[in-house]
């Protein structure tokens, strides 16, 4: 019975544990995209 409670607790906290790394990855991708767009604009702007 203790094993079930532990597994249940892990399942309940699993989305919270995945949220922050996922958020950081998304923000990192957005920052990289903005830097690349800025470089393109700075290079080819006439």
Image (cartoon, rainbow, N blue to C red):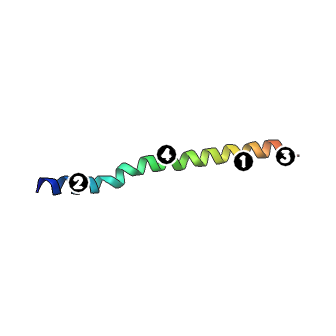
Asked which secondary structure carries label 3, the reply is loop
Label 2 to label 4: alpha-carbon separation: 24 Å
- Which mark sits nearer the N-terminus, 2 or 4? 2
- For label 2, the residue is 9
Q: Secondary structure at mark 1?
A: helix
- Could you tell whether 23 is left or right of 29 in the image? left
Q: Position of residue 21 (x, y in %)?
A: 44, 46
Structural distance between the alpha carbons of marks 1 and 2: 43 Å
Q: Distance of mark 2 from mark 3, alpha carbons?
A: 54 Å
Residue at point 68% right, 43% down?
35
> Which mark is first along the chain, 3 or 4?
4
Dot placed on the residue nearer the N-terminal end, 1 or 2? 2
* Earlier-in-chain disc, 1 versus 3: 1
**Secondary structure found at label 2:** helix
Q: Earlier in the sequence, mark 1 or mark 4?
A: 4
Which residue is under mark 4?
24
Q: Quadrant of the N terminus?
A: bottom left
- Label 3 sits on residue: 45
Which residue is pictured at 15% across the width and 54% down the height? Answer: 3
Q: Residues within 10 Å of mark 2 (few under 14, many from 20)?
A: few
């Amino acid at each position: 019975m203790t094993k079930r409670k532990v597994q249940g607790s892990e399942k309940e906290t699993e989305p919270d544990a995945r949220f922050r790394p996922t958020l950081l990855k998304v923000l990192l991708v957005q920052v990289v995209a903005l830097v690349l767009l800025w470089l393109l604009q700075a290079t080819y702007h006439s």
